[in-house]
Every structure is written in structure tokens, then in C-alpha cells.
């Protein structure tokens, strides 16, 4: 019997992707369409062989169709779709029609090139599509029935939830995407964020933008957007993952990339760190005090920088002394980025901002 509890990693519960929930709902609906009975719980096989079982949250039947719903449990991951109802409505199609996917209420439609799914298609990614096809074919074989069906996936309220995701920026309109490559949500997944960065670069490249920008947060993003007049689709929510973004850019170059961020995070990039998260990299105040010296700071200011509690404290004291520390940080950060890009044909530009979004440094 499949486990219905979550596997645990570092005391954090794993959850299930929207793709896994949609597959389970599809299997339950198609089974009911053929037999009149909904399997509850319904068991599916994930791409790596796990066989979780899901309890149904809703079910319905009509002439030539059946539907089932699963409540998504993202475990301990801060996922906007946690608790959302994922519904699959399966409807019989004429023989030979194959398996057709449709976006129902709350599921988006792709409108821009550059994503794994072409424009005009429901925002149901390739692995979830494959999982749903496989489960339809398996159930059809088991009952000796044809597997020609339309699968409509809906997420009530998904259009509102999608506003909190990358979808609007990626040109996915009308709702959420059905995602997942393994079926399992890993709590606080770095890989999921980096994957989103990659897709953002793909979409910007497909649109032919000669200049895109990646920012560590909303404040620096607003600054660089205004500075260059860039549209949202040319903006990448890089967060702390400078390395993940730059390594992808090395193989998928754009003519120009601006990296924007606050003083502390850009200081860490300038030091050579590629993961800017506070738990995985720290500002080296010995290194920073040496930059104060290079900027022309006196002995008192250099010692103060070495003994400072925060990078912002160093910034404030050097600014009060009239030193342009931001430009030095920007140039060093640019050197780090160029080192990662190697010989990729990308012009790199660094913009350093303060907490209010004012530009305090730009690379030369």
C-alpha cells in the first residue's frame, strides 16, 4: 500500500507538485468515467517510481465526463498553491483523437515563446503532461477501453494566486501553471527558484531583448527597471542565486545583462560568493575594510569598517566621509560575474542600491 504520509528531509515535510495532484485527479476521474466508481484514495506512480496515494476532495459525473479534485499539500514549502484544489475533468473524445489538454478556470495559457510549452497551449508542463498521458493509457489498458480523452485542469482561484508567481512576467495569462519534474515538492527548494530564473532568461531571449536585468529583490528591481526602461519580461527575479543565473547565462548568452542589488548582497558577490543568502555567505569585514582603504579612507575609517556589525554601517560611514565605496563594490562584483561567464559574449553591468533604492554604485 502506498504511503499517504510525507517523507521527511531535515525534519521538513515534503509535499506534492500540482502535476502530481493533477495526475491523481485525472486517474480518479477517468477510472470513474469507465467504471462508475471513484477510487479513493487514488494511487499514482511518479517519474522516479514512488507510489503516493491521494484522498479525493471533490468528485462529479455527467454524460460522457467525470471530474475529481485533490487538495494540494506542499508540505513545509512556502508554496502559494498550498491548499489549492486541483480539479481534473476527463471527457470522452471520438476514437483516434488522442489525449488533449485544456486549461480550465485558474490554469494559465502560454502566450510567449521560450517556455517548454508553445504559445496557445495550456500552461501544463511536459512532465505533468507525460504523467497524465501515462496514467490514462494505463487505466485504459486495464479496462480494455480507448484512451481518447480531453483532460481539463482547473484550480479555483488560480488566477488570483498566479499574481504572486512569475507567470505574468513569463507571459502566462489567466492562472497558474501545472508544474513538477519529480512530483515531489522539496521544502524551500533552491532548484525550483533557479529553474524559474532559467525560464525567465529563455522567455526574454525568445522575445529578442538585447538587454535584460537580474535583481536580488523588489527594491533594486524597481530601480533598474526605471533606470533602463525595461519591460517586466526582461526582468529576472534572481534573489540570492547569482551563480545559478550566471552559469545558465554562460550557455544561453544575451547581449547585455545588468545585475542589481543592495549593498550587502553585492558586497558578497564582489568577494566572490555566488550564493548571496545570509545563511550561506557572509560579508568579510576584513575584505571590506581593505576596499575602504582603496577608496581613500583614513586609518580611523578603515578600523571602523573592520569592526562594523553590518555592511550598511560601513556604507553609511564611508558615505558620510565622501567616499565612493559603491563603485568599488560594483567593479569587484562585475569581475566575479565575468569570471563565471568566462568567454560568453555577454556585457555585464552592475548597479548597487541602498535600502531606499537609490543608486550608490555602478560598474565602470
Image (cartoon, helix red, strand yellow):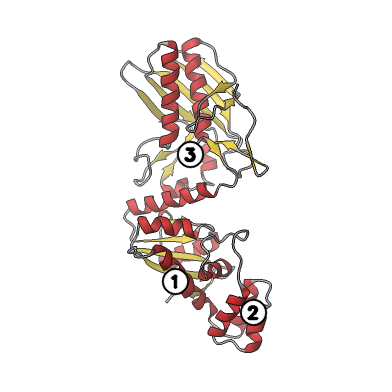
Considering every residue shown, the one lying at the far front of the view is 49
Q: Which mark is residue 335?
A: 1
Q: CA distance from mark 2 to mark 3?
A: 48 Å
The earlier-in-sequence mark between 2 and 1 is 2
Q: CA distance from mark 2 to mark 1?
A: 22 Å
At label 2, counting other C-alpha atoms closer than 10 Å, the crowd grade (few under 14, some 14-19, many 20 or more) is many
The earlier-in-sequence mark between 1 and 3 is 3
170 sits to left or right of 269: left
Residue 170 point in image, percent of width and height: 42, 48
- Tag 1 and tag 3, C-beta contact below 8 Å: no
Q: Residue at x 43, y 35 (%)?
A: 127
The earlier-in-sequence mark between 2 and 3 is 3
Q: Quadrant of residue 128?
A: top left
The kind of secondary structure element at disc 1 is helix
Task: From the viewer's side, name the closer residue of 212 and 310.
Answer: 310
174 sits to left or right of 186: left
Residue 277 point in image, percent of width and height: 58, 59
Q: CA distance from mark 1 to mark 3?
A: 40 Å
Considering every residue shown, the one lying at the far bottom of the view is 298
Residue 274 point in image, percent of width and height: 51, 62
Q: Which mark is residue 175?
A: 3
Residue 265 point in image, percent of width and height: 56, 66
Q: Name the quarter where the C terminus is drawn.
A: bottom left
Residue of label 2: 305
Amino acid at each position: 500500500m502506498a504511503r499517504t504520509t510525507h517523507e521527511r528531509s531535515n525534519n521538513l515535510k515534503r509535499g506534492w507538485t500540482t502535476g502530481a495532484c493533477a495526475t491523481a485527479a485525472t486517474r480518479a476521474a477517468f477510472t470513474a468515467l469507465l467504471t462508475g466508481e471513484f477510487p479513493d484514495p487514488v494511487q499514482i506512480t511518479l517519474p522516479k517510481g514512488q507510489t503516493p496515494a491521494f484522498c479525493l476532495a471533490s468528485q462529479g459525473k455527467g454524460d460522457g465526463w467525470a471530474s475529481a479534485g485533490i487538495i494540494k499539500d506542499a508540505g513545509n514549502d512556502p508554496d502559494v498553491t498550498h491548499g489549492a484544489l486541483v480539479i481534473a475533468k476527463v471527457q470522452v473524445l471520438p476514437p483516434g483523437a488522442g489525449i488533449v489538454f485544456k486549461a480550465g478556470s485558474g490554469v494559465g495559457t502560454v502566450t510567449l515563446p521560450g517556455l517548454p510549452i508553445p504559445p496557445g497551449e495550456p500552461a501544463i508542463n511536459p512532465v505533468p503532461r507525460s504523467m497524465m498521458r501515462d496514467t490514462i493509457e494505463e487505466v485504459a489498458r486495464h479496462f480494455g477501453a480507448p484512451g481518447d480523452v480531453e483532460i481539463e485542469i482547473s484550480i479555483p482561484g488560480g488566477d488570483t494566486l498566479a499574481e504572486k508567481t512569475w507567470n505574468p512576467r513569463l507571459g502566462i495569462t489567466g492562472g497558474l501553471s501545472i508544474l513538477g519534474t519529480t512530483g515531489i515538492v522539496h521544502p524551500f527548494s533552491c532548484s525550483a527558484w533557479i529553474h524559474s530564473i532559467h525560464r525567465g532568461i529563455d522567455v526574454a531571449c525568445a522575445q529578442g531583448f538585447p538587454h535584460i536585468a537580474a535583481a536580488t529583490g523588489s527594491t533594486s528591481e524597481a530601480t533598474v527597471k526605471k533606470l533602463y526602461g525595461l519591460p517586466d519580461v526582461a526582468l529576472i527575479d534572481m534573489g540570492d542565486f547569482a551563480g545559478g543565473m550566471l552559469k545558465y547565462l554562460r550557455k544561453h548568452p544575451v547581449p547585455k545583462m545588468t545585475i542589481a542589488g543592495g549593498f550587502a548582497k553585492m558586497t558578497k558577490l564582489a568577494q566572490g560568493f555566488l550564493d548571496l543568502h545570509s545563511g550561506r555567505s557572509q560579508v568579510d569585514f576584513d575584505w571590506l575594510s581593505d576596499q575602504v582603504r582603496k577608496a581613500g579612507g583614513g586609518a580611523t575609517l578603515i578600523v571602523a569598517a573592520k569592526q562594523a556589525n553590518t555592511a550598511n554601517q560601513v556604507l553609511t560611514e564611508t558615505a558620510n566621509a565622501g567616499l565612493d565605496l559603491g563603485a568599488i563594490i560594483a567593479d569587484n562584483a562585475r569581475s566575479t560575474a565575468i569570471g563565471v561567464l568566462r568567454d560568453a559574449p555577454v556585457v555585464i553591468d552592475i548597479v548597487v542600491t541602498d535600502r531606499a533604492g537609490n543608486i550608490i554604485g555602478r560598474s565602470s
